Image: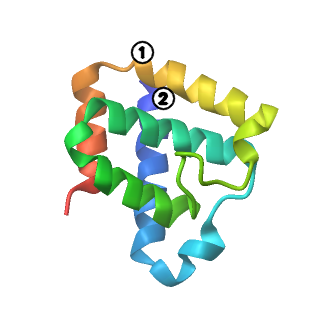
Amino acid sequence: MKFSLVMRLCVSAALLTILSSSMAIAAAPTDPSVRGAFDAIFAYCERIDPQDNAKFRQLQQAVLGHRSDGQDDGQQNSPDYRQSFDLVSRELESTPRAQGYQSCKAAVKS
């Protein structure tokens, strides 16, 4: 339940970053654990809502300034990144699928 709130807050932060596109690059998180958490959320959304993969990747690019498909700055090899990615991924997997789907869908709703 409380992680659902965290996920919604992260997605909301991502959307706010996009809305203020002039700040998107400056607001890109540089901390590996933050990037790991965001990447886990986007990977989860891509997995449970494959129809919107392109939208999730566009959102991820706007928020993080990179893509998680190997085009990053090397932070994915960081222990902090992996720990955060794994922790968030486990939490998301324990979220009811319908709830996760709705949250992801809301993030890319136009």
- Residue 100 vs residue 5, the one in the foreground: 100
Between the residue at mark 2 and the residue at mark 1, the CA separation in whole angstroms equals: 10 Å
- In the picture, measured across the screen, residue 5 lies left or right of residue 51, that is right
Asked whether residue 37 is in view, the answer is yes
Mark 2 crowd level (few <14, some 14–19, many ≥20, 10 Å Cα) = few
Identity of the residue drawn at 48% across and 29% down: 3
User: What type is the residue that disc 2 sits on?
Assistant: Phe
User: Which residue in the rendered view is the most extreme toward the front?
Assistant: 70
Q: Residue 54 location in percent, x, y?
A: 30, 54
Q: Is residue 109 left or right of residue 42?
A: left
**Residue shown at 25%/36% (left/top)?**
49
Figure colour scheme: rainbow
* In the image, farthest residue toward the top: 94
Q: Which quadrant is home to the C terminus?
A: bottom left
Quadrant hosting residue 71: bottom right
From the viewer's perspective, tell me whether residue 68 is left or right of residue 98: right
For the question of whether residue 107 can be seen, the reply is no
Is the residue under label 1 in contact with that under label 2 (CB below 8 Å)?
yes
User: Which percent across, then down, holds residue 43?
Assistant: 44, 37
- Taking depth in this image into account, of 78 and 14 the one nearest to the observer is 78
SS class of the residue under badge 1?
loop
What residue is pinned by disc 2? 3
Residue at the image position 44 percent from the left and 25 percent from the top: 92
Please determine whether, in this image, residue 35 is positioned above or below residue 13: above
Q: Position of residue 23 (x, y in %)?
A: 56, 79
| Residue picked out by circle 1 | 94
Tell me the element at label 2: helix
